[in-house]
Image (spheres, helix red, strand yellow):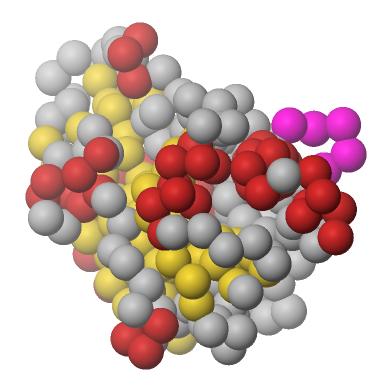
Amino acid sequence: MRIALGLQYDGSPYSGWQTQVNHNTVQDELEKAISAFVGEQASVEHPIHTITAGRTDTGVHALGQVVHFDTNVEREDFSWVRGVNSFLPSSIVVNWAKPVSDEFSARFSAYEREYIYALQAGPCRSPMSHSRAGYLMLPPGNWLDLEAMKKSAECLIGEYDFSSFRSSECQSKTPVKTIYSIEIISEQPWVYFRIRGNAFLHHMIRNIVGCFLQIGQGRQKPEWMTEVLAAKNRQIAAPTFMADGLYLAKITYPEEFAIPQPWLENSWLPAKVIGK
């Protein structure tokens, strides 16, 4: 049978989602926990291999990650939640579990992904947000030009070749993606970037945020974002911004699969940012 899980995790202790040799990853920890819960014999007969909706990078967090795996073990839904959580480190939590049809794929059935980038800006960073938010040093009394950033975001809405925001390590078959919406929410000393799209390239969100901050600080005009997008050249865009503030917030699937919504109430992000 196929089981889907909803996860939240603090990505700061991990080298991203995907299993890597000699690196600690979220996938490794989750698969070890599931294997321990189902038992040695079951995991030998049917080794646990998880498929994820989005392979988050080193230091990136998740509020609404979705995975699936196949197993011959049957348990009640909440038994999966309670049992797997008992073997997980405190930085990873299973929020829900449910059996799904073999037609469901956590990765390929998803048609929309939403990310939130949380940024603290000001003369001094907060140690309380270390690894949980990005930081931008601004002199006392200075603030970002929100209207300029919002204006620059308009050119990114739609289906485009996002090669200018693509990491050289990106494994996506195509740089063409669709962004549905971008919201920029300010609540000093915080700024939140909320971006919805069908899929994203490696480092795409962090590279876009880096460009926003160049514009917000007045180093570039809003029209510069249009030039960057049209160039399809990573070299002319801003440097990749830090991973600390990036959250995979939500994955959307066709209604037929009845995938639960993420438990965003568990997030420290403000209600107006997570859409509640």
| Image: 220 above or below 135 | below
Identify which residue is drawn at 69% across, 67% down.
72
> What range is drawn magenta here?
20-24
Identify which residue is drawn at 59% across, 32% down.
87
Asked if residue 22 is among those painted magenta in the image, a careful observer would answer yes
| Image: 2 above or below 158 | above
| Main secondary-structure element of the magenta-colored stretch | loop
Instruction: Kindly tell me whether residue 222 is visible in this rendering.
Output: no
Where is the N terminus found, in terms of image quarters? Answer: bottom right
Q: Classify residue 67 as left or right of residue 16.
A: left
Q: Quadrant of residue 120?
A: top left
Residue 5, x across and y down, in percent: 48, 58
Identify which residue is drawn at 68% across, 80% down.
174
Asked if residue 182 is among those painted magenta in the image, a careful observer would answer no
Q: Classify residue 116 as left or right of residue 36.
A: left
Where is the C terminus found, in terms of image quarters? Answer: bottom left
